[in-house]
Image (spheres, rainbow, N blue to C red):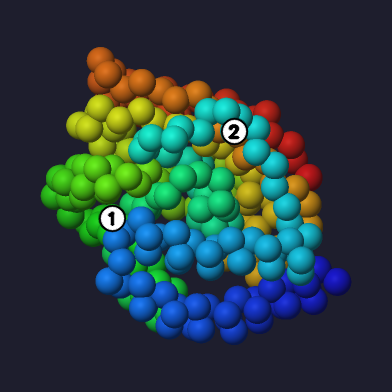
Amino acid sequence: MIYLRSTLFMLGQWLFTPIFTTLALFTFPFPPVTRYRFISLWAKSMLWWLRVTCKVRYEVIGREHIQTSPCIILSKHQSAWETLAFQEIFPPQVWVLKRELLWVPFFGWGLAMTSPIAINRAAGREALKQLVSQGKDRLAKGFCVVIFPEGTRIPPGERGKYHIGGAWLASHTGTPVTPVAHNAGEFWAKNSFLRKPGTITVRIGPPIVTTGLKIDALNQQVEDWIEQEMTRLPRP
């Protein structure tokens, strides 16, 4: 049954995405936040379809920590699921991502319309300058900035290197950081076709005030909180 349900989800995604992306292109003349609100309907639709076909739901612990003003969200990255669900959980947001994602037909075109910060990972310090420059712009426009410090999806039970990009942006803009832990990889694993039924748990931490914190200390504080919370999440 899990194979059938996963197949139905993928079929729906393949059929709906080109149609929705075509419609999304017509939002180009509108302000960035307005474009985002329309385009994020795709993610919310996919979450609904995931619940219907695969019985994947989620619960959020710590909703009271969600900020109404722009912040920097630093999160564990295990699955494609969080890139959908964060659009339903958090206020309007942009993502820091590798620029190659924008080249993916239909998906990448729609993604480009959401004002992401698309960086060249090989650019080193130039990428950090771009992150700060474009990050200030997105925050000023009312967006939160979502960054996955480990840079790639990490399987459950494993831990990647926490890169300083998110802490760097927070420090250079004086923006609070919201740390997030979740166990989405237990239900929708990296590069896996299968979506396992169950309830994903998302834990949102108290905002971390960045004023007076050195970049390395801030990055370590984020890592410590996320990894400690990961040990408390349920394992299916």
Say which residue label 2 marks: 63
Q: Secondary structure at mark 2?
A: helix
Compared with 89, 45 (above or below) is: below
Residue visible at 70% across and 42% down in the picture: 59
Q: Is residue 152 left or right of residue 42?
A: left
Question: Residue 39 location in percent, x, y?
Answer: 45, 66
**C-alpha span from label 2 to label 1:** 26 Å
- Name the quadrant of the N terminus: bottom right
Up/down of 60 relative to 108, above or below: above
> Residue at 36% across / 28% down in the picture?
176
Badge 1 is on which residue? Answer: 117
- Which element type, helix, strand or loop, lies under badge 1? strand
The image position of residue 101, as x and y in percent, is 37, 68
Looking at the image, residue 20 lies above or below residue 82: below
Residue 131: tell me if it is visible.
no
Which label lies toward us, 2 or 1? 2
Type of amino acid at the residue the image marks with label 2: Arg
